[in-house]
Image (cartoon, helix red, strand yellow):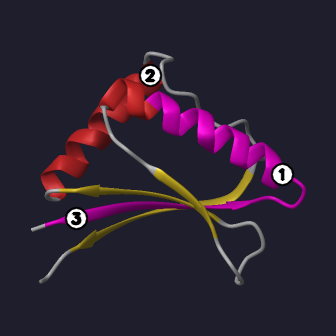
Amino acid sequence: MSAVFARIVTPNSGHLEENVEFSKRRIAAIREYCGVEIELRVRLGGPAGQLLMVSTHKDAGEIEEMRRKTMEGTAAGAIPQPEPGMAASVEDQVWLGIG
């Protein structure tokens, strides 16, 4: 069963460009450290400047492995963390395929 991991970031006012640049750096680091391809998108409508990082996986277990490696890489300093105050909110979602 396929699975999609989505991270939705709502930047604080005035921090959109900073969040876009940070997201690009984080995606590149996750790609290098975990071998996961992640797309970066911006929302049309809704909360202004909301960003979406999304990756597709074969199952939820693969997402858990990516999350474990991401936490490991972050703790080791290989994957950057955001500066305080950049984002108003960050929400992670996992979507499972049913077809």
Which class describes the residues within 10 Å of circle 3: few (<14), some (14-19), or many (20+)?
some
Q: Amino acid at mark 1?
A: His
Q: What residue is drawn where x is 33% and y is 40%?
A: 36
- Measure the C-alpha gap from mark 3 to mark 1: 30 Å
Q: Are marks 2 and 3 in contact (CB under 8 Å)?
A: no
Q: Earlier in the sequence, mark 2 or mark 3?
A: 3
Q: Amino acid at mark 2?
A: Ala
Q: Earlier in the sequence, mark 2 or mark 1?
A: 1
- Measure the C-alpha gap from mark 2 to mark 3: 25 Å
Q: Which residue was labeled with disc 3?
A: 3
- Give coordinates of residue 49: x percent, y percent: 75, 66
Q: What residue is drawn where x is 31% and y is 32%?
A: 35
- Measure the C-alpha gap from mark 2 to mark 1: 25 Å
In the rendered structure, the answer to whether residue 26 lies left or right of residue 96 reads right
Q: Which residue was labeled with disc 1?
A: 15
- Magenta stretch in the rendered image: 2-29
Residue 99 figure quarter: bottom left
Q: What residue is drawn where x is 30% and y is 64%?
A: 4
Q: Earlier in the sequence, mark 3 or mark 1?
A: 3
- Give coordinates of residue 34: x percent, y percent: 32, 31
Q: Are marks 3 and 1 in contact (CB under 8 Å)?
A: no
Which class describes the residues within 10 Å of circle 2: few (<14), some (14-19), or many (20+)?
few
